[in-house]
Amino acid sequence: MKQKRDLLDIRDLNETEIYRIFEKAKLFKYERKKGIIHQDVLNKKCIGLLFRKPSSRTRVSFEVAIIELGGSPVFLDASKLQISRGETIQDTAKTLNLYLGGLVIRTYEQSEVETFAQYIDSPVINALTDFSHPCQILADFFTIWEKKKNLKDVVITYIGDANNVCNTLIFGADILGVRINVSCPAKYTVSKKIIESMKNPSLLKISEDPYAFISESDVIYTDTWVSMGDESEKQVREEIFRPYQVNEKLVKNAPPDFLFMHCLPAHRGQEVTDEIIDGKNSVVWQQAENRLHVQKAILYLLYNS
Ligand code: CP
Ligand code: NVA
């Protein structure tokens, strides 16, 4: 019997598969603009979307991707399921397995998506955990690839909280051989576990100085200072991260054609100013659009290979 495949962590993919996703996403993007869609990819499968956290981009782009590939999305608000009243993950997973042909999950613990994957016989996809956000980062590397062509020549600088987005950028860079810098306060720096698990740790440089890597940055990426689940630390985080705001002054010595990236939602006036996110270097809307095309390519890979 063919083994099912999950996407729980970007490291579930190798470099060749990531480029296969990029090529397929490029084709899906082109074909969608021509009105061509592929209903045979999911062939009437019902795919659950179980969300324990809010979402605008991930949920809608997955629902549209599933519909355009011939499947039916089934949105599952976790607060309305029996897991919210104490039913175990295992029993929930075994139940969903009886009805669904796949599951997309957004939750807190990475171990929860792993448990779902263990009890579900069809593909399980991580739609964000506290640890990782693989679909986002695949769309981001695809966006950089579209803009800059050769990823091996690119230097990415992530500024701010070393969170799920930052972890996954580091792992993605490690797989693809891309140089990555992180500027972040010591209290919220990249964990030792992340660095130790890199295949090529020399790709990563870390500094507490938000200006340290600006002049060598082809991409400047930031994300919220207060991720979903971190709300109790809001005040202290907003204080500590203030020097890491991406604004005109910070990017003054960046290469003129640097790309500004943000996974969104943005907190304008906090991690980024209006001038930067709405400015000529910003590619945030291309990133958001590419979520759709890349997730279609991910579904294609998981269901058709
Ligand atoms: N970037 C991202 O995952 O956005 P949503 O939280 O809106 O899904
Ligand atoms: N780091 C953010 C990403 C949101 C898409 C969070 O986890 O809330």
Image: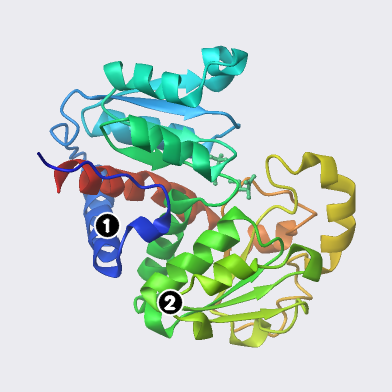
Q: Nearer the viewer, mark 1 or mark 2?
A: 2
Residue in front for this viewpoint, 45 or 40: 45
Q: Sequence-wise, which precedes: disc 1 or disc 2?
A: 1
- Where's the N terminus, which quadrant? top left
- Residue that numbered label 2 is attached to: 199
Residues at discs 1 and 2 in contact (Cβ within 8 Å)? no
Residue at the (63%, 63%) spot, across then down: 279
Secondary structure at badge 1 equals helix
Secondary structure at badge 2 equals loop
Query: Which class describes the residues within 10 Å of circle 2: few (<14), some (14-19), or many (20+)?
Result: few
| Protein image colouring | rainbow
Measured as percent of width and height from the top left, residue 86 is found at: 59, 16
State which quadrant residue 114 falls in. Answer: top left
In the image, residue 81 above or below residue 252: above
State which quadrant residue 152 falls in. Answer: bottom left
Measured as percent of width and height from the top left, residue 35 is found at: 21, 39
Residue at the (38%, 30%) spot, across then down: 63
Residue at the (27%, 57%) spot, across then down: 21
Q: Is residue 81 in view from this perspective?
A: no
- Residue that numbered label 1 is attached to: 21
Q: Left or right: where does residue 260 sit relative to residue 300? A: right
Residue in front for this viewpoint, 97 or 79: 97
